[in-house]
Amino acid sequence: MRRGNASAVLRAVVTEGPLPRADIARSTGLSAPSVTKLTALLVQAGLLREHAPAEATQGRPRVPVGVDPSGAVALGVHIGLLRTTLGLVCLDGTVLAQRVLDHEAPGDGGLAPRRIADQAADGAREFLADRLGGRRLLGTGISLGGWVDGERGVVVEHGALGWRDVRLVDLLDGRLPGPVRLEQSVRAAASAELWFGAGREVDDFVHIFFGNVLGAALVVDRAVHRGPGAAAGGIEHLPATDEPGARCPRCGTGCLSLLASDTAVVAAARARGLRLPDAGRLPVEHLVAAARPEGSGIGDPRAQDVLRRRARHAGRAVATVVDLLNPSRVVLAGGILAADEYLDDLRAEVTLRAHRGWDAATRVVPATFGTGALLVASAMPLLEAVYEDPIGTVGPGGRAVAAS
Ligand SMILES: [Zn+2]
């Protein structure tokens, strides 16, 4: 009972921002004395703290209680195709610090899971030594694309990395601050939207990621759907073109990833003679920069053309999703947002192709966290466990989970 009520208090504060105790009572339906006791417990656990009084009216000032960025935080780890990103993420989804670790160039067989795990573990140790300060770690959330079964801690398949049945949580156990929780990155991003973003206003939406990898997450009645084997959301090999010569090396057909991934759009630009460096920024970011007019220039028409085509192909896929599921929102994420001037092309394609979603284009929105979504998302599997049972996770004195 008390654990459930502590969860309700924490969830109210996390989603609504710092609140005076009276407002927490109103929002949760708990009595004022209960709220006073529970907030004291959560403050003691390092999850909440009292903020400066918001208003100076007559009588006693109303002291808001909010999350404590100097208290307890989660380590978020996103493993991408080209780099791993680490971040300290506050209970309300704020990223306090982050660091990027570039991967080595993949060999023919992809990137060995052990190398990536070693790099993440070593990088996290240094990052935390530099940036954690006096904060306490609640644990680690990891996310990556592909087919991921978070409950079993396994990456079932990540085609672009060349991974199959990788027991990632076992590989990292004891090397990252525990507990370590894993989730597929698009589903984790959908959770972040549910708590802090586009999902606050609607009960159902589809989150679609167009980046180096592709993926979708389906939210129905405010729950993220996983299905048997956590296999839901694989859109990368949806049939997309019959053009001869368009053959995906993994599925052998002209699939969506051949037309709408960051990798594909960069390859298409290079095939048309654009020089895109691999260093500094991601190649797709160099591509977007090349497309944009600078000063009185007009931008490179080849770069503009490949980006517009990608947006159109992505729009066709979104139209299929709209007809099939009729979601209240389609939340877009990934490298496609870096070129947001082409989102209207994507929307136009949705309008053209969707048979039932006459107003579907207006329901297509960018992810709240933009291109930085993956870091917040990575922390979500861990943060959700804390929201669910703050006292059980942290312990009444805040001692149960120590930084390692
Ligand atoms: Zn394919």
Image (spheres, helix red, strand yellow):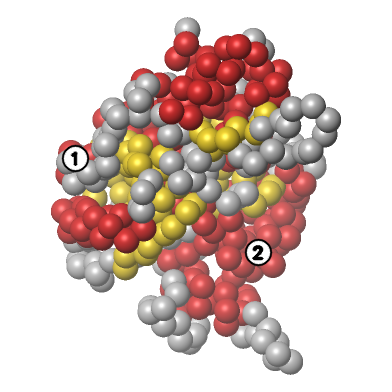
Q: Residue furthest front?
A: 59
Element class at badge 2: helix
Question: Viewed as shown, does residue 34 lie left or right of 70?
Answer: right
Left or right: 76 as drawn, with respect to 262: left
Residue 246: x %, y % from top left: 43, 64
Of labels 2 and 1, the one closer to you: 1
Query: Quick one: label 2, few (<14), some, or many (20+) residues within 10 Å?
Result: some
Residue name at image x 65 percent, y 64 percent:
340
Give the residue at x 74% y 36%: 356
Residue 317 x, y percent position in the rendering: 58, 49
Q: Which amino acid does the dot numbered 2 rest on?
A: Asp
User: Which quadrant is home to the C terminus?
Assistant: top left
Residue for point 16% across, 53% down? 114
Front residue of 340/235: it is: 340
Q: Position of residue 379 (x, y in %)?
A: 42, 43
Label number found at residue 173:
1
